[in-house]
Amino acid sequence: MNVTELARLPNYDAGTYFCELTRRRPDDGGVPDKLLVRLDRIGLEALHARAAAAETELIDLGITFTVYSEATAIDRILPFDCIPRIITPSEWRTIETASIQRVAALNAFLADVYGPGKIVKDGVIPADLVFGNANYRPEMKDFPVTHGTYVHVCGIDIIRDEHGEFRILEDNARTPSGVSYVIENRHLMLRAFPDLMAGIKLLPVDDYGRRLRAAMTEIAPGGHDDPQVVLLSPGIYNSAYFEHVFLAREMGVPLVQGSDLIVENDHVYMRTTVGLCAVHTIYRRLNDDFLDPEVFRPDSMLGVPGLIRAWRAGNVAIANAVGTGVADDKAVYAYMPRIIKYYLGEEAIIQNVQTNICREAEGLQYTLDHLHELVIKPVGESGGYGITIGPRASKAELESARAALLADPAQWISQPMIGLSVAPTLAADGIGPRHLDLRPFVVTGRDSWVLPGGLTRVAMKQGSLIVNSSQGGGSKDTWVLAEG
Amino acid sequence: MRQEPVLLSRDAEGLFWMARYLERVENLARLIDVSQSFESPGYEAEAWFALIRINADEKPYAKLVSESGFDGVDPDAVKRSYLLDHNNPTGIPYNLEMARTCARTLRPLISTEMWRQINVFHRVIQNITTADLEGDRLSRLCMRIKDNVQAHTGITEGTLYRDQGWQFYQLGRVIERADQTTRLLDIKYHQLLPREGEAKRVADLTQWNAVLRAAAGYHAFKRLSRAAFSPEDVVGFLLRDPSFPRSVMLCIRRVEQHLDDLRRHHNLSGTNEAIERAEFLREFLTDRSTRHIIDAGLHQYLDQIQIHLMELAGSIGRSFFRDWRPEAAA
């Protein structure tokens, strides 16, 4: 505890968790103090009023995701917390280099498993984990992609434990979303809380659209100095539609739906008022399954028949590449430290959350011995399905987990419970600590670039460790302090 | 920099329809406002039934009243169906919902200010309650709806990029406006009048003035008109005045101009059929006297104009939009 905490946040207690605002860091430039003084000057009542006004503005601007029920469509905002999360220059250097390293390894891994498959032959990762993976796409085999880039946009979920150590929780190498909120949150902050930000030097977040467009241009098939880039969206009924709009606008490219595109003679065209116009790069926000009914789900109405044919003919680039799901899978995640080492000859700059691979005898034994303190996750599931949280499980639940583990160890991994870091967050009863994570976004064409900061997701409920927007999580503006 | 951004067919259609739906919302508010002013003690039902007739809503309305068990026309039920019922395709909430859906698909093209305004407007409409339909509040509600569409129009004028998308937006707007002006005129046709004498003359004059006011043409008409009032003059003014913004003639002239811009400045071939149809419509408006039109049947004549407008819109759709379907509820 320090002086600032006492003076400015009288009832604030981060407990044993690492606090992203009140914990002193040598290169924080005194910004956290400055911020606390300013928050104090505004006062709780005014903070509440301005936060409410800011949320109304998000609704008016339609910066929303849509939740559909049987009869109605409700536009929800991602709850916005007005107290920013601060990242110091040295912390950012770590996150930035670790993110780039991670993407380099993911791309090398994908080029290998869709090519010679050396990593499997060398026994670093089991063959069935790769080739038997539901997200492995045989259609991708022996089809080299421009600059060796498969994962053009990657969102990497990073958490911070009780000791202040960053840990990578998950890679999102398919169609990660959330980047629009990073930029909109900053704009909102500038409009609604200019007095909190005055004079504080931050790395800008406005460059994302330009960088993404540049990457999409770099991967276009050769021979075009000004290739036609489009963003392919499932349409207005997709919950991330706002983000698709945002990115199309920021890139200055048409927002298309599958029905706007047509493949003729293995070339992709879009239907315009002057007839068919050639398309060279597609930034798709559509899952692999839906991309091309000729190759994947035949019932998909969202995709474009013949798209994969055009791609294999080298006439169109698709970002992210098809089949990246084999790299961000939970089971493969556990091998990421080894994958990084194998391709890059480096240690991971930010470590995984310690993961016990139960298909390996040692990992299984450790898991069985420490069942009551571990989180047990099935490798093939997502969205929290099938997870047993040891410390919160009943005896019977632990026993059934044990039985499942023994029956088919390869289906399971286990991880310790992590006490995510917290930051002061405005709540109805004042300012309290709330758990959060960070999703930086890496854009890769020829080279990788990381948007400064990323999406800070925050659990709005006290004590909750779940930051997902589907579970009532919100977000914060993420300040990366400029050096010097 | 590119000379001109490409425009998806789907977006051209979206712009065309967004403008149409909003123009329709504004005119529905005008029609409701004027229907109220037609109400006279003892004849409330007739005034409101005209609104149903000009929207060709007799059938759905009959269903509505048979379900409610009300015998005859219930003015409150009519108001509710146009202002509160979100499923009535000729009502205000439905048309605004459609406009907003268009705007949602068009968000990469339209300005943030346009999107924001339509979004806030949508909330205004969603929050209408039965209390807003009572007494003097109804007229104020209609005013607020008109204000909102006009705010949209102004924001669009000041912020929408003037590429071919702008032309399609304007085409939708003026085609719908021409159609709505014929409906406004038609509403007069359906009004009852006292049988004869001074009472008839006064009632007739009052009703025509209400039509002019609803079309925002009352003062302009006064400046042009002779001392003696004649219905032919009102019909002539609303149908073919060259300078009145809501006259059918002015709308058709604008259609021709936007089509010509598309052909000449945006290099869109395929405008020929639509241009011919607009020319035909312009001639149709001037080839007979208003006296002749009224004698031969104003209602039938207005119907003819509406059919020609539909064909004009269909021709634009076939040339430039994907999946063009003529509108079922027109």
Image: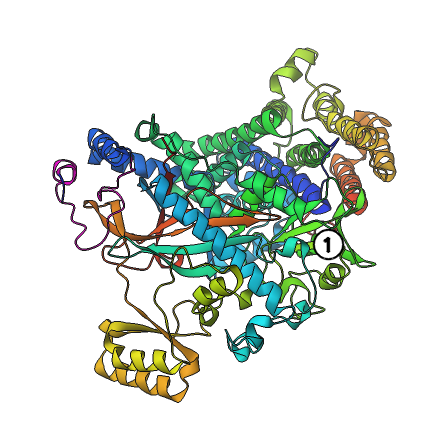
User: Is residue A22 in the magenta section?
Assistant: yes
Above or below for A193 versus B220: below
Residue under label 1, please give it.
A316
Which SS does the magenta portion mostly show? loop
Q: Is residue B280 left or right of residue B314?
A: right
Image quadrant of residue B25? top right
Image quadrant of residue A118? bottom right
Instruction: Give whichever of B115, B242 is nearer the camera.
Output: B115
Query: Residue B202, image x and y in percent?
Result: 60, 23
Q: Chain of mark 1?
A: A
Identified at 45% across, 39% down, the residue is A184
Q: Is residue A426 left or right of residue A216?
A: left
How many residues crowd around disc 1 within 10 Å: few (fewer than 14), some, or many (20 or more)? many
Range drawn in magenta: A3-28
- Residue B70 visible? The answer is no
Identified at 34% across, 67% down, the residue is A354
Query: Residue B12, image x and y in percent?
Result: 70, 41
Identified at 62% across, 42% down, the residue is A214
